[in-house]
Every structure is written in structure tokens, then in C-alpha cells.
Amino acid sequence: MLGRAADNIFWMARHVERVESTVRLLRATELNALLTASAGDGGGEDEAIWARPLLLTGRMDDFMVRYEQLSSGRVMAYMLFDRDNPASVKSVLERARENARATRHLLTNEVWESLNHTWIAIRDQHYVTMQRTAVADRLDWLLERCFMFRGALFGSMRRDESLRFANIGMYLERGDHTARLLAAQPDRAGAAADPAAQMREYYEGTALLKALGSYRAYRETFASNLDFGRIAELLILHATVPRSLRGCIDEVAETLRILNPTAESLKVAHELQYRLQTVQIGHVRRVGMRAFLLDFCKELDEISDRIRHDFMMVQ
């Protein structure tokens, strides 16, 4: 496979995964805001909640320059439909479609049509038109379209290099999103002594697990109330959880091994994989959860750069 084609397929899958992650983040933010409001917390807290998607994607400054004030509607409009925001669903989906169009001859009809139909349906949409139906329903629809794309990818593509590069892109993006979402969680020191803080922690834990599709996995793994220490353990170290850091790096390493067992990118992936296989959650807490997670993101970036150098001849 030509390096440029591999690069396009890698980014096609990575961009669709980014769309899903953004939609999941917005759904979780909306849920967190609703739960907090039902508990009687005030508007200041609501603004802090809606700031998190912008902080997580590094778009806060641009948002405030153009929208001036935080609100659920403005954040939704900016993160879903703003073509001038490179992190919006519409912008990312457009890039995914362009990647797919450049490698149309390597994709099945099912993969291309699932992505192209999604883009056509969302291309001319704006937040005002979305509100005429229901925002939650539209977010669910976007998630379903991402599921459909992934189903077409794994259900219709040959098990060749095209599918493997798509798989790598998807899991690198997924692992990066999980790590950044965990790193963005606020400090909860002293929450145990404050009933209001305990309730907030419960709501935020629920929203976080649902954002990462791991609420049921937590309930099946830990016979206890929601605890952020155990949530972190689940999402960092448990290989059977699809969006855990360990699960993502395992998939990346195995796919790289199949592609080229002597690649430099595989050596870096194996080092990170071994680190996650041997580390204990207590050690992560001692070195600092946020520092550990941001370091993980840097290592994922290094793996991504080496993959592009090893297979795509992109400097």
C-alpha cells in the first residue's frame, strides 16, 4: 500500500473516532449539568461544567473571543456545527470524508456510503435547526452513525493493510481521548467529608463512565458505589474495557506486530504496553494521576509519529 493511502485511511478512522468522542463528551456534559441542576446547585457550577469540553479540546480562548459567554446552547453550537472551529463535529467529519474520498478505491461501498451519507445529512445543519427536533436525539443519531461506520469497516473490509491502519488510527485516538478526559477531572481532595461534594462526585463519575461507554463495566467489576480511584483503575489498567488505556495500547501493539514486527513504532508501543501491564494504581497516584496521563498522551503522540515515519513516509 502506498504511504499516502495508508495515511488517509489512518486519519479517516481517527477522525470518525474523534467525532464519536466529541459527541460522547457533549452527552456526558449535558447529563452532568442536568444531574447537578436537579441536586439544586447554582448557575456558576453549570458554567464550570460547560467549560470542560472547551478546556479539554483547547478551544476555550477561541470560543470566548467569538461567543463571549458560556452557555449550553453556545457550547453545543460551537462544538457541533461551527465550521471555523477545527475541533467541531462538522469540521472533523468533513476531514474524515476527504480522507475517505482520497482512498475511495480501497474502501468498500458500505464504508464510503456510511460516511458520505452522514456528511450529507449534517452538512447544512445548524444548532437552531437541531433544536427543532431534540438535541439529545440528534446526538444519539450521530453516535449511531459512528457505530454504523465502524460496523461497515469491520464487517465489509478485507483483513488487509487498509483495515489495520484504520484500526491503529481508531485506537490511538480512543486512548488519547480517555487519557485527556481523565486528566481533566478536578481535584477531589476533601470530598469524603463534604456531602455536597460527595453527591457531585457521584454525578460526575456517572457522566464520565457513560462518556466512555464503561458504566456497566464498572458495575460488573466493582461491587461498590462510584469511586474515582476505582474509575481511574478501570479506565487505565483493565485490558477488557474497550476504551481503557491498556485495552487501546494492546490493540495498537498487536496490529503493529502483524504489519511489521521489526518496526520502530512497535518497540515504542511495547514499552508503553509493558508499563501499563506492570504498573499498579497506587504507583500512579503517588507519581500524580494527571502527570501520568499527560505523559501517556505524549507517548501516544510519539507512537503516532513513528508509525507515520515507518509506514507512510510522512515526516
Image (tube, rainbow, N blue to C red):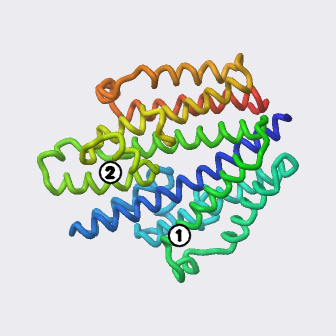
Q: Measuring from the top left, give residue 173's x and y in whole percent.
A: 58, 42
Q: Residue, x 33% and y 28% (percent of image)?
A: 281
Seen in the image, is 47 located left or right of residue 160? left
**In the image, residue 149 above or below residue 184:** below
Task: State how far apart marks 2 and 1 are (Cα).
Answer: 25 Å
Residue, disc 1? 77
- N-term-proximal mark, 2 vs 1: 1
Q: Amino acid at mark 1?
A: Ala
Q: Amino acid at mark 2?
A: Gly
Dot 1 alpha-carbon crowd within 10 angstroms: few under 14, some 14 to 19, many 20 or more: some
- Which residue of the protein is positioned furthest toward the top in this rendering? 262
Q: Is residue 184 above or below residue 273?
A: below
188 relative position to 175: left or right: left
Kindly indicate the quadrant of the structure image that contains residue 148. Answer: bottom right
**Residue 200 pos. (x, y %):** 25, 56
| Residue designated by label 2 | 205
Instruction: Please identify the quadrant where the N terminus is shown.
Output: top right
Dot 2: element: helix
Percent of width and height locating residue 233: 36, 35
**Residue 69 at x, y = what percent?**
41, 69
Residue depth check, mark 2 versus mark 1: number of the one nearer the observer: 2
Q: How many marks?
A: 2
Give me the residue at 50% from left, 42% from top: 243
Q: Secondary structure at mark 1?
A: helix
In the displayed image of the protein, which residue is found farthest to the right? 105
